[in-house]
Amino acid sequence: SQQGEEDPQALSIQEGENATMNCSYKTSINNLQWYRQNSGRGLVHLILIRSNEREKHSGRLRVTLDTSKKSSSLLITASRAADTASYFCATVGRGSSNTGKLIFGQGTTLQVKP
Amino acid sequence: EAGVAQSPRYKIIEKRQSVAFWCNPISGHATLYWYQQILGQGPKLLIQFQNNGVVDDSQLPKDRFSAERLKGVDSTLKIQPAKLEDSAVYLCASSRGQGSNEQFFGPGTRLTVL
């Protein structure tokens, strides 16, 4: 079974607005990663946050991690139509730190309207 | 650098037929992964190679799926015989080594089993 659950399953916003996606997971992790998947394209790595980190930024992306609640959030600020995609969180379990095995959530589909 | 290459991009077969997918990872990447992504779900790891050795194949349906990575570079994933529930996108990914933080994904092969 997959590790994570993402919320919401689908999100529709206007260009310029912020988008927030949440991810919950079940077991202790080494790190948590967010990936983006455009229609017809492969997955692209966005950002990684380690279990001892609480917040991380990359451009318009902000990721938070709360290990006590086993949850993470991805915030995309000032969204653009090009941000339309599916977003997946993926975890590397503490027992999988040597192999880097990723377990993906179900994903959030984001639509940004021009 | 060139990305992960996969072929074919699309394949339609009848149930009980055989099919093979090919993957060429990024040059120098020691670790190669095959994922299955069913529509509406996140990718699920099928098998992970480190060079030409199998690291994890715990979720590979070994009665019908097989994979190899001869010479530690290219890899093939085979399904024989295919079932309707094998309809999915098969993603190949590579990373520099085990435990590496980021995986680089190919565009995937969309398989339809009729």
Image (cartoon, helix red, strand yellow):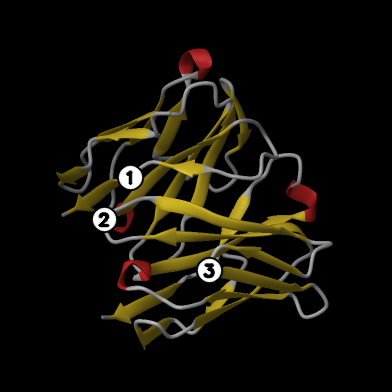
Q: Quadrant of the C terminus of chain B?
A: bottom left
* Residue plotted at (39% across, 29% down): B2
Q: Which residue is mark 2?
A: A40
* Residue plotted at (43% across, 85% down): A17
The answer for how far apart the CA atoms under marks 2 and 3 are is 24 Å
Q: Nearer the viewer, residue A91 or B81?
A: A91
Q: Which residue is mark 1?
A: B107
**Mark 1 nearby-residue class (10 Å; few <14, some 14–19, many ≥20):** many
Q: Secondary structure at mark 1?
A: loop
Q: Tell me: B7 left or right of B58.
A: left
In the image, what residue type sits under mark 1?
A: Pro
Q: Position of residue B82 (x, y in %)?
A: 28, 45
Q: Position of residue A40 (x, y in %)?
A: 26, 55
Q: Are marks 1 and 2 in contact (CB under 8 Å)?
A: yes
Q: Are marks 2 and 3 in contact (CB under 8 Å)?
A: no
Q: Position of residue A51 (x, y in %)?
A: 79, 61
Residue A100, by quadrant, is: top right
